[in-house]
Image: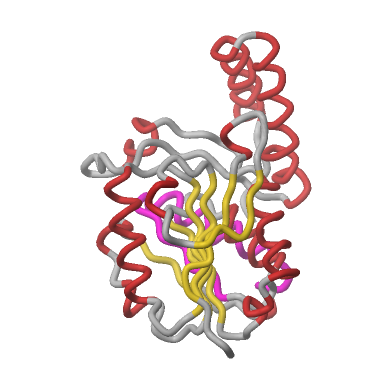
Amino acid sequence: MVEKMNKSEKQSKFSAYKNIIQYHGVINGVRRIVDQFCQNDWYDIKNGTNFSQILSGDQYHGSLESKNSAVMHYQPVYTAAIKKPLQDMVKNQPVVGASSTCFVDLGCGRGKALHIAKSTLQHIIPIGIELNEELLEDAKKNLASVRSYQKDSHSVFVNANVNDVDYNDLLADFDVVIVFNKNSFDKATTDNTLRKIIEASKGKSLFYIYSNPVFEDLFVQHQCVFTMKGWHKNWNTKVFKINEQEL
């Protein structure tokens, strides 16, 4: 479990709230702060995790030897933007109940989506792909706080650029693949990884959860089975059913 915030981190949090007001103005700034607390900070307080810190592109790349232009920033997903799609899938896509299901987070950061997925779909195998090794280590610690994970600790963490992953090998053992992408990549990376994952998922059931779907045009040929919208782009989430097989 990641340690709770110290005094310096709390001061940094209030400074971040101040910056939100300055950036968005009073009305939308207050709305963003409410969202930040309810959808990010409160999840950390409740679970003893450390997901809520936002990193700019420069901060994200600070510990890396070279800058990956495909990664624009690191920002944790709103709790509802991953929890509600998963709850809908449990209700309306029974195939996700298969024991051979994996949940792949493209750019998992500190692992919030993995944490929520494992808490919601206890049988899934979480797979986190993250270029920043420090964030990936935090993801491992955060995931260890999930009770069902403690009983079955099998998971996969890949320290790599999402463009360079061998998805054929990564997904070979699964019948159902759930992919999550909180938009933090450029269009070329989103397109490249989507095509590779579709190719690697032939004969499997494949669902793609896309939060803040900026490059939605890449999914026009696929069926959208869930939509969530809100006042800010961080609320917007869609689920696409790309393949489905009978299990």
Of the 4 image quadrants, the one containing the N terminus is bottom right
Image x and y of residue 88, in percent: 71, 62
- Image point 38% across, 65% down: which residue? 158
Magenta highlight on residue 131: yes
Is the image coloured rainbow, by chain, by secondary structure, or in one colour? secondary structure
- Would residue 58 be found to the left or right of residue 28 on screen? left
Quarter of image, res 14 = top right
For the view shown, which residue lies furthest in the right direction? 46
| Residue 150 in the image: above or below residue 4 | below
- Image point 69% across, 79% down: which residue? 151
- Nearest the camera: 45 or 219? 219
Task: Tell me which segment is drawn in magenta.
Answer: 125-149
| Residue 169 in the image: above or below residue 164 | below
| Residue 26 in the image: above or below residue 186 | above
Magenta highlight on residue 56: no
Image x and y of residue 96, in percent: 63, 76
Image x and y of residue 108, in percent: 48, 54
| Residue 99 in the image: above or below residue 163 | below
- Nearest the camera: 231 or 173? 231
- Image point 42% across, 55% down: which residue? 219
- Nearest the camera: 189 or 244? 244
Image x and y of residue 79, in percent: 68, 47
For the view shown, which residue lies furthest in the front direction? 221
For the view shown, which residue lies furthest in the bottom direction? 247
- Image point 64% across, 43% down: which residue? 78
- Nearest the camera: 241 or 116? 241
Of the 4 image quadrants, the one containing the C terminus is bottom right
* Total number of numbered discs in the rendering: 0
